[in-house]
Amino acid sequence: MAKPFDLGDLGNIMEQAKAMQDRIADLQADVGGKTVEASAGGGMVTATVNGKLEVVSISIEPDVINDGDREMLQDLVAAAVNEAIRKAQALMTEEMSRLTGGLKIPGLG
C-alpha cells in the first residue's frame, strides 16, 4: 500500500529548493565578479570579459593600429571578444556543475 503524502515532506522540499536558489544566486554574484581574458592574433588583441558576459576591456597592440589594416583589426577584436565570452560561459557552467553535483537543471547552464 502506498504511503500517504506527508505535508512535512513538501515543506522540506521547499526549504531545500529555497536553499539551492540562494546558493545559485550567491554563485552568480561570485562568478559575475570574476574575469577571463582571451587573445587573438598572437596576443595582438586581448579582450577581458566578466562573468556577467560584459566586455570589461579591450587591449590592442600599437603595431596593429599602425599597420592600418582596419579589417584585420576588426576581425581580431571580434575573435578575442567571442573567445572571452566562451571562456566566461565555460566558467559559469563549471561553477554551476560544481554546485549542483553535475545535475543538469534547465535554465541554469
Image (cartoon, rainbow, N blue to C red):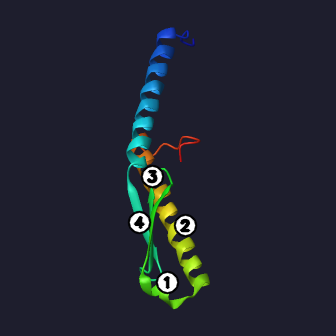
Q: Is residue 2 above or below residue 59?
A: above
**CA distance separating discs 1 and 4:** 20 Å
Amino acid tagged 1:
Ile
Label 1 belongs to which residue?
65
The mark that comes first in sequence, 2 or 1, is: 1
Residue drawn at x 55%, y 80% is: 73
The mark tally for this picture is 4
The mark that comes first in sequence, 3 or 4, is: 4
Residue drawn at x 40%, y 34% is: 23
Residue drawn at x 58%, y 77% is: 74
Disc 3 crowd, CA 10 A, few/some/many (<14, 14-19, 20+): many
**CA distance separating discs 2 and 3:** 14 Å
Q: Give the label on residue 51, or none.
A: 3
* The N terminus lies in quadrant: top right
Please state which of residues 92 and 43 is positioned toward the viewer in this rendering.
Answer: 43
Amino acid tagged 2:
Asn
Q: Give the label on residue 82, or none.
A: 2
**Quarter location, residue 20:** top left
Q: Secondary structure at mark 4?
A: strand
